[in-house]
Amino acid sequence: IFAHVVRAPEDPILGVTVAYNKDPSPVKLNCGVGAYRTEDGKPLVLNVVRRAEQKLVNDMSRNKEYLPIVGLADFNKSSAKLIFGADSPVIQENRVTTVQCLSGTGSLRVGGEFLAKHYHQRTIYLPQPTWGNHPKVFTMAGLSIKPYRYYLPATRGLDFQGLLEDLGSAPSGAIVLLHACAHNPTGVDPSPQQWEQIRQLIRSKSLLPFFDSAYQGFASGSLDEDAQAVRMFAADGGELFVGQSYAKNMGLYAERVGALSIVCKTADVASKVESQLKLVIRPMYSSPPIHGASIVATILNDRDLYNDWTIELKGMADRIIRMRQQLFDALRARGTPGDWSHIIKQIGMFTFTGLNPEQVSFMTKEYHIYLTSDGRISMAGLNSKTVPHLADAIHAAVTR
Ligand code: LMR
């Protein structure tokens, strides 16, 4: 009865890892998925995560009972503090509801379904380009998607004028997806002044901001600095949504731990919204898993662990910045045609190289280097030993 089912294509991002895993070449390099690797090319379990897990294992009072539908209370409270700041009025006035979700993706999906059910506007504007999963998540949630201009290939920078025009002509009330920091895939963020202009436009048109915060701490190395855009919107008293992920900043990829926060006008509205979020979550996966959230809550609520986390986080962010410089220098040394300064200007995990799909497939075929076909390179997948190989491949691709 399923003979008619056609084979689906691999996911454009996760499928890169599938192809990489099948390649027997000893020089193969995975710069596809945004996952941090050490200088030895190995996945990293943060020291603070190991210490938190040890603490949890030793605590015999813990059990594996179901969590509430909205997740671990301590985790939710600390996640809100992390993104909004402990003294934020939205927290002091109980105007935010925060629910534990399955990492960033799950937070976006739960938020999207809530909006499809309870909000008068069904259109969400996504930056062009955006993370490849965004259109699918929000379409499946029941929203219709529209693009807004974000990136200008000619300057490899922000298309600020295009962004203002497109959001300026969006219908009143439309939802706008914003990357809180370290825009994926471009690595291009608005400046604080530009954020302020975006905020004014969004509020004046009564658009609804929905932040995707997947890289807090990864853009600048500072958790507070990377939350500035979200906090700017939270400070003006208006509504907003934010999905948080701990995949990258705590290296908890497979634990699927994240949070959705919805800031409302009053505490009463926030508690009613939370009651409806439960109705979205219960038939979807009932309640979230406990382990990852307990790790995060342990780290966020222990002063020593928290401080050590910020140091490890800065270490990861700095290593990525070093990789940017090394790749830039390696291309310069090879005399590779073109201006590659965007490699050091862009921020976060990715460089949006400007390589086209044909050049990408050449690099994969001839150099066993795996990246997404839009030319995005995960800088976190590089190390000093692999930079020359990547530079050789880019050089060959653009001079062929
Ligand atoms: C990425 O963009 O590579 C990451 O966010 C991983 C993913 O799930 O796509």
Image (cartoon, rainbow, N blue to C red):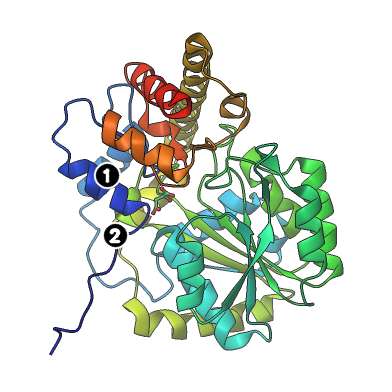
Question: What number of labels is visible?
Answer: 2
Q: Which residue is mark 1?
A: 53
- Residue 84's spot in the image, x, y percent? 64, 53
Residue at the location (21% across, 45% down)? 58
- Any part of residue 285 in sight: yes
Q: What percent of the width, then of the height, locates residue 349?
A: 48, 37
Describe residue 167's horizontal placement relative to residue 368 as left or right. right
Q: Identify the residue at the far bottom of this view.
A: 1
What's the residue at 64%, 46% (across, down)?
227
Quadrant in which residue 106 is drawn = bottom left
- Give amino acid for label 2: Glu
Q: Which mark is residue 10?
A: 2
Q: Is residue 205 above or below residue 18?
A: below
Q: Is residue 49 shown left or right of residue 299? A: left
Q: Secondary structure at mark 1?
A: helix
Helix or strand or loop: what does disc 2 sit on?
loop
**Residue farthest toward the front in the current orientation of the protein:** 400
- Under mark 1, the amino acid is Glu
